[in-house]
Amino acid sequence: MSKTWKIVIFSAIGAFLLCCGGGAAGLYFIVNSATKAPKAAAGDFLTALESGRTQAAYDMLCASAQRQYGPEAFDTYVKKDPVTGHDLDWGGSYSNVNGTETASIGASVTYKSSGKSKHTFEMLKESGAWKVCGNPY
């Protein structure tokens, strides 16, 4: 194999690797950007629960979740096994279907009595704000 062909092959491999790396970095940026706001909202929800502000956490629930739990029922439910810590997973998922924005954010949640457990927070954008929906606790 001639020196010219070696240069061409190694250049092609290098260009391919750069494109793949750029694609991966672009994908990371897109996923991270799309889930940044819903992830912050899920974090705020968990922080409110950790500090015992159940009314503030209740206010961060979407309308359908609020219909499922009244404020008093939610407070009672949360106090059975309070949240003591959390770690949000990297990434998550985001969807916009006909203007309805949703996201799924994974977290490791630590409860006072039952310990650490994985939970996926289903998020819904209502009136311009990200809200916790589905199974909030």
Image: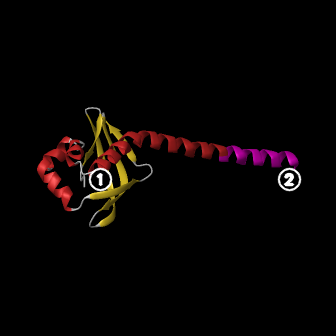
| Label 1 sits on residue | 50
Q: Nearer the viewer, residue 111 or 2?
A: 111
Across and down, in percent, residue 86 comes to 36, 55
Residue found at x 45% / y 51%: 90
Residue found at x 19% / y 58%: 79
Q: Is residue 110 above or below residue 20?
A: below
Q: Which is the main secondary structure of the residues drawn in magenta?
A: helix
Q: Which residues are magenta?
A: 1-17
| Label 2 sits on residue | 1
Q: Is residue 28 above or below residue 79?
A: above
Q: Quadrant of the C terminus?
A: bottom left
Q: Farthest residue toward the right? A: 2
Residue 8: within the magenta? yes
Front: mark 2 or 1: 1
User: Distance of mark 2 from mark 1, alpha carbons?
Assistant: 66 Å
Q: Is residue 70 visible?
A: no
Type of residue at label 2? Met
Residue 95: within the magenta? no
Secondary element type, mark 2: loop
Across and down, in percent, residue 39 comes to 37, 45
Type of residue at label 1? Glu
Across and down, in percent, residue 57 comes to 24, 46
